[in-house]
Image (spheres, grey):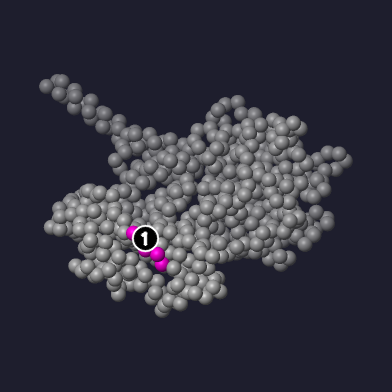
């Protein structure tokens, strides 16, 4: 009896201690998040998840903290675990975060599905934050397609990762080469004596090696005139004759946020004067003003910089202020909606030789989180932002584009794969460089037709799905009068029936998972296919108007489990419904292009490839077992046709 009583007491105190540990960790995590110390929060919640990994609330805590701490792999693991169980019902932002993490690792097709899910479910939400994320998700759906186009049509440059003479295992950024000397900023702080001490960003220089092309000697920290202790020093910019230098100095608001101001020094009597903070209207109380770039607009000096001051489009915007001959500045001008957006635009670099602003943005369509864009100044305003392409941009953060003083080489900062890191990949920016076309040569014109063609190619193979034995069930005809849009609408109307049939006999979590499989199949496959088909048709209309000759190859599939003759005819009927879609699109605008013999106009040629058999399937072919032979998502995935190729004829 005493042994039993002792065991009960031990168990009681174990449970009590366990409960106390959970409470303590939750308290510590809240405190870390309040300070925006996401590194500590991630460590704390990892301990929490080791104690109890079954609660979705704890899984979300570690996922959010890991994402904010740039530990993308851990965050994605837990978000996907949550989504599999919840399907975005309660934890509505999870699909958005999954999409973002997938995009940032270059998985654009998967990311597009999750962005599309989030947009459709939240576009009419009255909550302002969900409205913002829904607008972002809509933008990212298009960006995922555009990213694939950029990758398939790379810019002809070789991006070089600078070696350990310049880059370290922490961040290097804001590079600028002037007369064979590279100026940059880095978090490596020689004054740190303890691994737990906070480091500060400082300014460094590295001189080009006289023996090796595009190599630098070991970087050296600038003296205390530029690097003030106990504060972050960054972002070097000079005027044209190298008599003025501009830098940013930033103080920490918390573990993740900073308040920055712009400073300037003059070169007088053979030395640099003490850095002085620029007065208003450049620096303004209560906001960040950073990343200065002095250049010229209309042959007058202008200071470009990034700021979150009021009067902008949202978050960080790019501004410029004209500089007077006495060194004072006029009121800053916001670059407007073609450059600035509701999200962050940062790291401006204006090149007077071609009137081009280079900057980074999280909103304009690109490959990753921050991409580099350019905008042309035409004496009165800036043009629409244009992505400068892959491999200059990657699926990671690409920022701080600059051109050297000789105008023959560009530099960027990026945390892409291959960058050095301390504890996790992609934590830290490194400096990269690449040669550029001399600015004296005129820019190549943009081939808009090629862009449209590439957008169409991204959509292929385009897969479309059908309900069982549709269209024209229980017949052996090979054509139908039905338009694929009609078969799609009829199919979509059966979604609830699919859920009812497929979840029959299941309970609790098993029923929930089965329900999710059906919903995801309709959203990710059936709806996505129709959405891509409409987009394909829109692009097809535009290329035909430009006189292109287009060959569209279609293929139907049939299951080896049923009669081959019947299924071949069924596949042909399904292809017939797709042709009907094109023939009836916008009241028949494509009809005149089919096999058109006028060489001056566009032409469509349809080609049906031989009907293909799907691999031997484990899907039931028992007509009485409709749950598995008809309503299972695995069976539904086999009922498809595809546009498998498009080609352009001369």
Residue on which the image places disc 1 = 609
In percent of width and height, residue 42 lies at 43, 38
- At x 83%, y 39%, the residue is 271
Q: Is residue 254 visible?
A: no
**x then y, percent, for residue 215:** 69, 35
Viewer-closest of 595 and 495? 595
Specify whether 640 is left or right of 501: right
- Whether residue 216 is situated above or below residue 456 in the rendered picture: above
Magenta region includes residue 173: no
Displayed quadrant of residue 26 = top left
Q: Residue 404's x, y, as percent?
A: 73, 46
Front-most of residues 245 and 159:
159
Position of residue 161 in the picture relative to residue 79 (left or right): right
Q: Does dot 1 land on a helix, a strand or a loop?
A: loop
Rendered-image quadrant of the C terminus: bottom right
Circle 1 crowding by C-alpha within 10 Å: few under 14, some 14–19, many from 20: few
Residue 432 vertical position relative to residue 591 in the rendered view, above or below = above
Between 416 and 548, which is closer to the camera in this rendering? 548
Residue occupying the point 30% across, 35% down: 19
Judged from this view, the residue extending furthest toward the bottom is: 587
Position in image of residue 144 (x %, y %): 47, 55
Kindly tell me whether residue 596 is visible in this rendering: yes
Q: Residue at x 43, y 64 (%)?
A: 552
| Horizontal arrangement in the rendering, residue 345 relative to residue 123 (left or right) | right
Viewer-side residue, 49 vs 257: 49
Residue numbers of the magenta segment:
606-610
Magenta: main secondary structure equals strand
């Amino acid at each position: 009896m005493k042994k039993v009583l002792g065991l009960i007491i031990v168990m009681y105190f174990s449970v009590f201690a366990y409960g106390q540990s959970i409470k303590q960790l939750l308290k510590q995590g809240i405190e870390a998040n309040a300070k925006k110390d996401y590194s500590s929060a991630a460590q704390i919640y990892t301990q929490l998840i080791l104690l109890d990994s079954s609660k979705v609330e704890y899984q979300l805590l570690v996922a959010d903290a890991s994402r904010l701490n740039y530990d993308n792999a851990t965050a994605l693991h837990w978000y996907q675990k949550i989504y599999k169980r919840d399907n975005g019902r309660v934890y509505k932002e999870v699909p958005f975060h999954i999409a973002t993490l997938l995009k940032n690792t270059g998985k654009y097709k998967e990311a597009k599905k999750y962005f599309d899910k989030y947009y459709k479910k939240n576009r009419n939400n009255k909550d302002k934050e969900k409205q913002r994320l829904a607008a972002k998700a809509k933008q990212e759906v298009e960006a995922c397609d555009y990213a694939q186009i950029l990758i398939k049509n790379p810019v002809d440059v070789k991006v070089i990762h600078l070696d350990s003479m310049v880059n370290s295992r922490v961040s290097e950024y804001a590079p600028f080469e002037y007369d064979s000397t590279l100026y940059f900023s880095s978090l490596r702080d020689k004054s740190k004596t303890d691994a737990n001490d906070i480091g500060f960003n400082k300014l460094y220089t590295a001189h080009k090696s006289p023996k090796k092309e595009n190599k630098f000697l070991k970087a050296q920290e600038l003296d205390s005139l530029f690097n003030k202790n106990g504060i972050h020093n960054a972002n070097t910019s000079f005027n044209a004759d190298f008599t003025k230098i501009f830098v940013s100095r930033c103080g920490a608001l918390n573990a993740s946020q900073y308040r920055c101001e712009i400073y300037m020094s003059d070169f007088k009597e053979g030395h640099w004067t003490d850095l002085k903070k620029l007065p208003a209207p450049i620096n303004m109380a209560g906001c960040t003003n950073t990343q200065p770039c002095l250049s010229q607009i209309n042959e007058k000096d202008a200071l470009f910089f990034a700021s979150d001051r009021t009067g902008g489009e949202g978050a960080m915007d790019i501004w410029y202020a004209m500089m007077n001959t006495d060194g004072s500045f006029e009121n800053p001008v916001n670059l407007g909606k073609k450059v600035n957006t509701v999200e962050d635009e940062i790291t401006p670099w204006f090149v007077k030789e071609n009137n081009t602003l280079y900057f980074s943005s999280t909103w304009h369509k690109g490959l990753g989180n921050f991409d580099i864009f350019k905008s042309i100044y035409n004496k009165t305003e800036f043009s629409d932002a244009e992505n400068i392409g892959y491999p200059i941009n990657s699926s990671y953060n690409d920022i701080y584009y600059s051109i050297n003083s000789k105008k023959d080489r560009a530099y960027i900062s990026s945390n892409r794969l291959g960058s050095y890191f301390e504890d996790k990949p992609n934590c830290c920016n490194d400096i990269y460089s690449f040669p550029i076309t001399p600015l004296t040569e005129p820019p190549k014109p943009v081939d808009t037709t090629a862009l449209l063609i590439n957008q169409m190619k991204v959509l292929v193979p385009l897969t479309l799905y059908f309900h069982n034995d549709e269209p024209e069930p229980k017949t052996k005809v090979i054509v139908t009068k039905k338009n694929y849009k009609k078969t799609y609408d009829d199919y979509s109307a059966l979604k609830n029936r699919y859920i009812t049939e497929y979840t029959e006999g299941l309970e609790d979590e098993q029923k929930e998972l089965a329900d999710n499989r059906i919903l995801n199949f309709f959203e990710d496959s059936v709806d996505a296919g129709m959405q891509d088909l409409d987009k394909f048709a829109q692009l097809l209309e535009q290329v035909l108007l430009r006189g292109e000759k287009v060959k569209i190859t279609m293929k139907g599939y049939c299951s080896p489990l049923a009669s081959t003759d019947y299924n071949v005819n069924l596949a042909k009927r399904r292809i017939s419904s797709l042709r009907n879609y094109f023939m009836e699109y916008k009241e028949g605008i494509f009809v005149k292009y089919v096999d058109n013999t006028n060489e001056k106009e566009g032409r469509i040629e349809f080609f049906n490839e031989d009907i293909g058999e799907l691999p031997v399937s484990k899907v039931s072919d028992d007509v009485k077992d409709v749950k598995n032979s008809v309503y299972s998502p695995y069976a539904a995935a086999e009922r498809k046709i595809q546009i498998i190729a498009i080609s352009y004829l001369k």
